[in-house]
Every structure is written in structure tokens, then in C-alpha cells.
């Protein structure tokens, strides 16, 4: 009961767009995580840290819509990366049993969507649905200011014309994709830029990937939280 009350209070603090995408069941992010996403985007805009906003793991597009709106307000581009179909399996021994059990439930058709909805990974034409959701929020996926890259990260990221990056929201669950994004986006991050890590407290592989990355780099520091920030120094 207490957590439900807290979530309601946090929901009131969200922007109109964040409340809308939650009401439309377009995001799995809890209010506290969405608040931190908005805080990050707003802070980067206020400080005018140069670079695009990117999201790795779009799902139904809710948090991407919020990020794209903040990006557009500052004249930034937004790039979203996803396979736009069922999530690929965890492939590292570092992922742990929880990740493998979660993937088995998805693979076997047992995963539940938000509310009574179908789980997004089972939907046909997910890419087109996401494009429509962006359009419904007056955000055109035009291939220039707002770009959605369909495919595996290791196939789409090297071809993406992004330049500098100010904010990268990493929401891809397993060790290998999280580590790939950290390693391959870090070199594009501006000073003061932020990684926002969604699954650090949810899946062991994601946490290990982040911890390893921080151990190997002295140019990033973590600000703890439900979805921690990694700050480019």
C-alpha cells in the first residue's frame, strides 16, 4: 500500500508526456525511474551538454518518446535502437539463472504485457506501432531528427551517423548487449554526458557489465539510484 501511494505521488511529478505514455501503457518504467530519466534529460538540456539522446531497448516506445521530446526542445537528434521483435536470448554465463528463466518465459509465450495487453515481443509490426506512437505525440520518425534503428545493436550502431552523445539510456537486460553499448558508446560521450542504466538492480548480467566497465575506466563515475547514472568526467 505504501509503495502504491509513493508511486502515485511520483506520478504527479512527471511531465505531461510521461504521464501520457504511462496511461497509454507504452512504458515499463516505474515512476521513480521515469523521474530520473526526465531529470537527466532536463539537466543535460539546462547545462547544454552537446550531443544526441539515444536509447538502447525501445520496447513500446514510451521512454523514447519522452527522450525525443526533450531532445527536440534543445534541437538535438534522438536515436532509438531495438530489434523490434522478441528480445534475443542471454548469451553470457555472467547473466545468471534469473535472466535465463526470464527469457524462457518470453520464448515459451508466457510473458505478460502491461495491464491486460499482449507482451510487446509477441506483437506483429512492432516497429510500425512504435512509429505510430511517436507520431501520436507529435514526434515524426523522420530519419534525421528522430531515427529508429531496427536490428541487433552490433549491426546498427556502427552504421548510425550520430556524432556526439549526451544521454544514452541502456535498457537491454542482459550482459552482452549492456557491455556492448557501454564499450561502443563511451567514446562518443561528451564531457558531462550520462549513461542511464535501467537493469542494474534487476539482472545480474547488467550489473556485472556496468561494474566491469567502471573498473576498467577512470573517466566515468556512478551516481547510485534505482536506475544509476554513469557520468562522463
Image (cartoon, grey):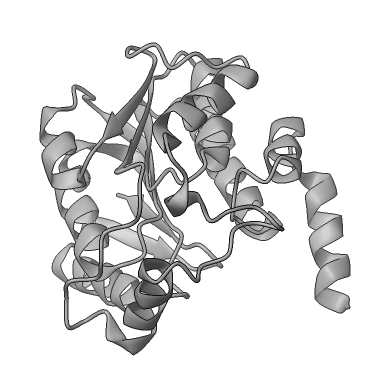
Measuring from the top left, give residue 100's x and y in whole percent.
Answer: 32, 80
Report the side of 34 relative to 154 (left or right). right
Q: Name the residue located 39 percent from the left edge and 72 percent from the top edge.
A: 108
Image: 188 above or below 51: below
Q: Is residue 69 visible?
A: no
Report the side of 52 relative to 177 (left or right). right
Measuring from the top left, give residue 102's x and y in whole percent.
Answer: 41, 76
From the viewer's side, name the closer residue of 55 and 100.
Answer: 100
From the viewer's side, name the closer residue of 7 and 106.
Answer: 106
Q: Is residue 219 visible?
A: yes
- Quarter of the image with the N terminus is bottom right
Q: Name the residue located 57 percent from the left edge and 40 percent from the top edge.
A: 62
Report the side of 158 relative to 181 (left or right). left
Measuring from the top left, give residue 172's x and y in whole percent.
Answer: 35, 57
Q: Residue furthest bottom?
A: 97
Report the side of 110 relative to 117 (left or right). left
The answer to which quarter of the image holds residue 98 is bottom left
Measuring from the top left, give residue 21's x and y in whole percent.
Answer: 67, 38
Q: Name the residue located 36 percent from the left edge and 68 percent from the top edge.
A: 107
The answer to which quarter of the image holds residue 88 is bottom left
Amino acid at each position: 500500500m505504501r509503495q502504491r501511494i509513493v508511486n502515485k505521488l511520483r506520478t504527479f511529478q512527471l511531465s505531461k508526456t510521461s504521464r501520457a505514455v504511462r496511461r497509454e501503457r507504452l512504458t515499463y518504467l516505474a515512476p521513480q525511474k521515469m523521474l530520473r530519466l526526465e531529470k537527466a534529460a532536463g539537466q543535460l538540456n539546462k547545462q547544454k551538454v552537446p550531443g544526441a539522446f539515444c536509447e538502447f531497448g525501445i520496447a513500446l516506445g514510451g521512454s523514447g518518446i519522452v527522450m525525443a521530446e526533450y531532445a527536440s526542445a534543445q534541437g538535438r537528434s534522438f536515436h532509438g535502437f531495438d530489434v523490434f521483435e522478441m528480445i534475443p536470448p542471454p548469451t553470457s554465463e555472467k547473466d545468471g539463472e534469473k535472466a535465463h528463466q526470464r527469457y524462457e518465459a518470453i520464448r515459451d509465450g508466457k510473458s505478460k504485457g502491461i495491464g491486460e495487453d499482449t507482451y510487446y515481443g509477441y506483437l506483429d509490426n512492432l516497429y510500425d506501432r512504435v512509429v505510430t506512437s511517436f507520431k501520436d505525440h507529435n514526434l515524426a520518425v523522420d530519419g534525421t531528427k528522430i531515427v529508429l534503428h531496427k536490428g541487433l545493436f552490433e549491426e546498427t550502431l556502427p552504421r548510425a551517423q550520430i556524432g556526439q552523445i549526451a544521454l544514452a539510456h541502456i535498457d537491454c537486460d542482459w550482459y552482452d548487449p549492456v557491455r556492448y553499448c557501454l564499450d561502443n558508446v563511451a567514446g562518443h560521450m561528451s564531457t558531462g554526458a550520462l549513461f542511464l542504466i535501467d537493469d542494474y538492480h534487476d539482472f545480474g548480467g547488467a550489473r556485472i557489465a556496468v561494474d566491469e566497465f567502471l573498473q576498467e575506466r577512470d573517466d566515468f563515475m556512478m551516481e547510485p539510484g534505482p536506475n544509476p547514472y554513469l557520468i562522463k568526467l
